[in-house]
Image (spheres, helix red, strand yellow):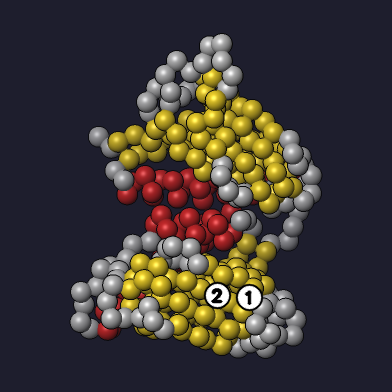
């Protein structure tokens, strides 16, 4: 959950500078600012899942697409959760990260085609170092600068009361709204929330929710989130015309616990959302679903 939310937040919000800059000091300043921005953007995401964060280290260096960076992290605390986030300059198109223990076992890897990789892992009780691999996959110049931020994260004490679960959903929806708003603003659009629904489901069950305020040919974003006991949630948007069966126009196509779908309102149709709880470790699981209207700025 945390890794996916942070990846979405970083990709939608971090700006990189295309660096026709001769002075390496300026490159370092760019990377330092990006790491600061990462920390700022991560805070609401972490708070949405009742977790704290502390930046405990950083690495700033440069490499080309023919070389990998390798770092031995020797000061990580035992039995502790960590996030490692990578950033790079405007000449870098794809940066990958991997974290291994001393036996060579890979604890996490991010090889997606983006320049903001995120690793999430937990140290064990008796490992004295971890190996971090940095791979500059795409670099348009002779060498690209990159930075790696190392963050310690700790969970807040768990609670099983419904009010606490509701608070988790509140914070997750607030973090999602920030991401949707910032992405829309970058594309010259405004965001207006038109619908919100909250409930709970057991594994394999679903809710079908009528969406009454969808307007023809207007663009929308629907997002669902769930509590800390939920590992996967499906979301589907359907339309129904008179005398026909529901027809999906947007649906989840990957395993995720915060599905996000864009769709356009269809004429002569009733719209509905189906939320399906696919994995829940402590039943039932709470969830929230919102729909935002996207409109061009006047």
Vertical arrangement, residue 212 with respect to residue 225, above or below:
above
Circle on res. 210: none
Can you give x and y, in whole percent of width and height, for residue 173 in the image?
Answer: 55, 45
Can you give x and y, in whole percent of width and height, for residue 118 in the image?
Answer: 52, 67
Q: Nearer the viewer, residue 177 or 118?
A: 118
Say which quadrant the N terminus sits in.
bottom right
Residue at 35% from the left image edge and 81% from the top image edge? 64
Name the residue that disc number 2 marks: 98
Residue at 37% from the left image edge and 78% from the top image edge? 65
Whether residue 286 can be seen here: no
Residue at 29% from the left image edge and 43% from the top image edge? 188
Say which quadrant the C terminus sits in.
top left
Q: Tell me if 202 is positioned left or right of 149 in this view.
A: right
Q: Nearer the viewer, residue 28 or 217?
A: 217
Residue at 71% from the left image edge and 37% from the top image edge? 200
Element carrying mark 2: strand
State how far apart marks 2 and 1 are (Cα).
7 Å
């Amino acid at each position: 959950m945390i890794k996916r939310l942070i990846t979405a937040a970083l990709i939608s919000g971090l700006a990189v500078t295309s660096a026709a800059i001769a002075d390496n000091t300026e490159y370092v300043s760019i990377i330092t600012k990006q790491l600061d921005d990462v920390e700022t953007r991560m805070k609401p995401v972490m708070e949405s899942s009742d977790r704290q964060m502390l930046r405990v280290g950083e690495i700033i260096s440069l490499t080309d697409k023919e070389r990998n960076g390798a770092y031995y992290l020797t000061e990580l605390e035992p039995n502790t959760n960590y996030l490692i986030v990578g950033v790079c300059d405007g000449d870098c198109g794809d940066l990958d990260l991997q974290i291994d223990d001393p036996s060579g076992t890979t604890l996490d890897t991010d090889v997606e085609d983006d320049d903001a990789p995120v690793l999430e892992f937990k140290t064990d009780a008796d490992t004295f170092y971890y190996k971090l691999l940095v791979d500059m996959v795409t670099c348009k110049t002779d060498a690209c600068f990159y930075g790696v931020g190392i963050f310690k994260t700790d969970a807040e004490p768990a609670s099983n009361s419904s009010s606490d679960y509701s608070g988790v959903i509140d914070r997750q929806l607030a973090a999602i709204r920030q991401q949707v708003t910032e992405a829309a603003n970058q594309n010259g659009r405004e965001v207006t929330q038109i619908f919100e629904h909250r409930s709970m489901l057991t594994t394999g069950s679903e809710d079908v929710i009528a969406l009454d305020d969808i307007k023809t040919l207007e663009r929308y974003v629907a997002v669902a989130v769930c509590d800390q006991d939920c590992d996967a949630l499906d979301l589907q948007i359907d339309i129904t015309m008179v005398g026909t069966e529901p027809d999906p126009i947007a649906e989840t196509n990957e395993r995720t616990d915060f599905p996000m779908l864009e769709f356009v309102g269809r004429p002569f149709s009733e719209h509905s959302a189906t939320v399906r709880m696919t994995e829940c470790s402590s039943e039932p699981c709470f969830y929230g679903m919102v729909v935002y209207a996207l409109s061009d700025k006047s």
